[in-house]
Amino acid sequence: MVKAMNTHLFTKLLDQVSHLTDQQNQLLGDALNEHDPVARIIKKIEQRLVDNPECPHCHSNFINRHGKTGGMQRYKCKNCLKTFNSTTKTPSAWLHYKDRWFDYYKCMLESKVLRESVAICRINLKTSFRWRHKFLQLPAMLKAYKLEGIIEAD
Ligand SMILES: [Zn+2]
């Protein structure tokens, strides 16, 4: 468990962040990403298609890479010609909104109320209810993917 930075230092840090060069900004972003549990989960889930290439629609093994969407690898099936990514037809298809999802995750950690989370994550209330439900299912989902240990409070 990391001890929280005191508010004064944190405010100072935020102030410094606004004076970063583009390259420093990029480095900071990368560093933050390493601690992003969503990014780690996605990496793990994407690895499944690399290890075992299979179309989720027709189960053909003849698939090609087909660009990237939202930071995730897309594939196109040579058999049924449909496109997909590693979350298509899986319980984690909702990771589609992973950027907002991570914001939402932070809102939940900070115990923000639904309406506040909705404003921060630019989602509607219905989606927010659904996500909250998904989050409560997360331990079971991680178990299904044998991803225990990936999300750890650090
Ligand atoms: Zn197919």
Image (cartoon, rainbow, N blue to C red):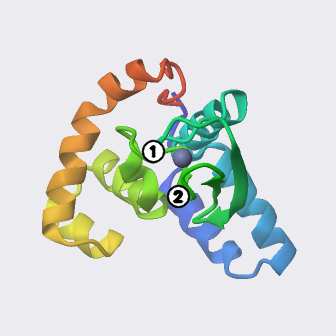
Q: Which mark is residue 83?
A: none
Quarter location, residue 117 = bottom left
Which quadrant would the C terminus be assigned to in this image? top right
Q: Which amino acid lies under the numbered mark 1 shown in the image of this protein?
A: His
Residue 113 visible in the displayed image = no
Locate residue 88, reporting x and y percent: 45, 48
Q: Which residue is mark 1?
A: 57
| Residue at image point 62% right, 40% down | 46
Locate residue 98, reporting x and y percent: 47, 57
Q: Nearest the camera: 148 or 25? A: 148
Locate residue 73, reporting x and y percent: 66, 54
Locate residue 62, reporting x and y percent: 69, 41
Q: Which residue is mark 2?
A: 82
| Residue at image point 54% right, 37% down | 41
Count of marks placed on residues: 2
| Residue at image point 39% right, 39% down | 90
Q: Is mark 1 within 8 Å of ligand 1?
A: yes
Looking at the image, residue 93 lies above or below residue 113: above
Looking at the image, residue 108 lies above or below residue 139: below
Category of crowding for the residue at label 1, using alpha-carbon neighbours closer than 10 angstroms: few (below 14), some (14–19), many (at least 20)? some
Q: Is mark 2 within 8 Å of ligand 1?
A: yes
Horizontally, residue 67 falls left or right of residue 144, namely right
> Please, what secondary structure does the residue beneath circle 2 have?
loop
Q: Which amino acid lies under the numbered mark 2 shown in the image of this protein?
A: Lys
Q: Nearest the camera: 36 or 55? A: 55
Cα–Cα span, label 1 and label 2:
8 Å
Horizontally, residue 57 falls left or right of residue 116, namely right
Q: Nearest the camera: 23 or 44? A: 44
Q: Nearest the camera: 29 or 136? A: 136
